[in-house]
Image (spheres, grey):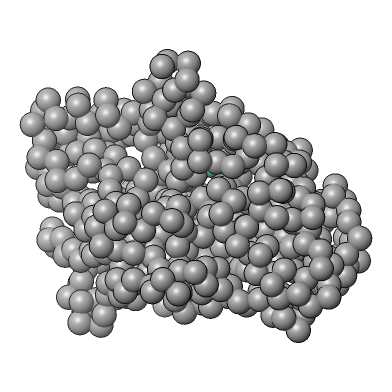
Amino acid sequence: MMPDDTLSDSLEQFDGWVDPLMSADKPEEACGVFGVYAPGEQVANLAYFGLYALQHRGQESAGIATFEDGTVHLHKEMGLVSQVFNETILSELTGNLAIGHTRYSTTGSSRAVNAQPAVVPTRLGKIALAHNGNLVNTQTLREELLEQNHNFLTTTDSEAIAWAIAEAVNAGSPWVEAATHAFKRCQGAFSLVIGTPDGMIGTRDPNGIRPLVIGTLPQESPDDAPRYVLASETCGLDIIGADYLREVAPGELVWITDAGLASSRWAEQSQRKLCIFEMIYFARPDSVVHDESLYSYRLRIGRQLAIESAIDADIVIAVPDSGVPAAIGFSQASGIPYAEGLIKNRYVGRTFIQPTQIMRDAGIKMKLNPLKDVLAGKRVVIVDDSIVRGTTSRKIVKALRDAGAIEVHMRISSPPVTHPCFYGIDTDSQDHLIAATKPVAEIAQQIGVDSLQYLSLEGMLTATREDTNEFCSACFTGDYPIAVPAPLKRSKLMLEKAATS
Ligand code: SF4
């Protein structure tokens, strides 16, 4: 995530790829993965639409690899899915199976070479791998693999996984055995979709930190072979008319071929730990988790927030879009009318064009424009899903006051983010997290609100209506479900740094 005032830093880091709207002051998504095994279909087009639906999970690069009689066709570039592909490119991506990826970089810098799928050769033909998550043992795994002279093209953990599979294949194992062997060498968060000349593999790490679901395309005749889809979220199935079958279980490997779907376990049953931030913010509200849309969960946390932090006010508004369901829930439970107070410009994405100084000074209005008619003279409750650095919150509050709001009360539908994520979400290092360094009263003062309250950890977890142990909430608690090696911890945790300096 980039701070607002370091455009030159961001230019360097992002290799010329600049977001003129500046950081949204949110944890950045890791990636979206998609795979389709559908002989006879235009698999690249299906992957294109699947990635389109998963665009919110990563906007830096996109790629699709297709498999056709042992040949891999690959196209990947920096940019949004709609910028990277056109009809001509898609028409050249022929085959029976497609693997797609949309990326936000968490390991490896944001450069075209690091775009996925990662393609590596093996004795049985090439594989194409798409990864969502982050390994915590990348360095060790890379060093082990480099000793075997593998020809790394990138600095990504994803390529390391691909080479680990290739190594096992080249040692004589068939696909599933090789993949199983490689997955056992990986520690951390990984939801993977992998294409091979013989079929498609899907898997999740033993804790299931990142989501991955299975769908089926409708059969034209009962004799047709089943055609399967793998996607980070169910919205990736809906867009192509695929039916949701089930999620890939943590530690499960699915092997999809002409013979159908075969399932095996490569890891002992572990405690499930789905990232709670997927529930609160990352995944699309229309995606289904635990048999209900995340919109319903987000309504509930909004209601819970209203119960925990009641306030006398005239209207409830949201920071669009992610704060909307919780704001509606807040309104329902509090009886304070819901209104639209900020209008989002939906059609500005990443661009190479740098904003002028005047535009930068306009700040948040480039992205969110306040509605004066709605806000003037009102006591406003504004609901957001999280605060990471606080820089954008401050600008939003100022914009509301400039539009005439007489009181601004901020309510956050998650607890304070106090710890960084090591499992594939860029929440920045701990010293940049405002709640890691300041108590709530001070944050309120810094962002300029009349009051600020966060949802409790218990409120967030019990609203899932699932076993509360089944979620990772380490960025709120520091209780990391997968051990993080000390050097990696030191890179992001200021307390660890202090202890070793
Ligand atoms: S640390 Fe936070 S963002 Fe990372 S996986 Fe756990 S809950 Fe999700």
Q: Left or right: where does residue 171 sit relative to residue 337?
A: left
Residue visible at 88% across and 64% down in the picture: 313
Position of residue 473 relative to residue 312, above or below, is above
Residue drawn 84% across the image and 55% down it: 306
Which residue is found at the position 29% from the left and 63% from the top? 17
Q: Within the image, what quadrant is residue 382 found in?
A: bottom right
On the image, the x and y values in percent for residue 367 come to 53, 72
Q: Where is residue 398 in the image (x, y as percent from the top left)?
A: 66, 65
Residue projecting furthest to the top: 500
Q: Using the rendered image of the protein, determine whether residue 402 is visible from the camera's viewpoint.
A: yes
Identify which residue is drawn at 49% across, 44% down: 427
Q: In this view, does 305 lie above or below 432?
A: below
Task: Tell me: residue 229, above or below residue 419.
Answer: below
Percent of width and height locating residue 424: 43, 43
x and y, in percent, of residue 331 in the image? 83, 65
Please give the count of numbered marks on the rendered protein. 0
Q: In which quarter of the image is ligand 1?
A: top right
Nearest the eye: 245 or 44: 44
Taking the image as shown, residue 141 lies to the left or right of residue 453, namely left
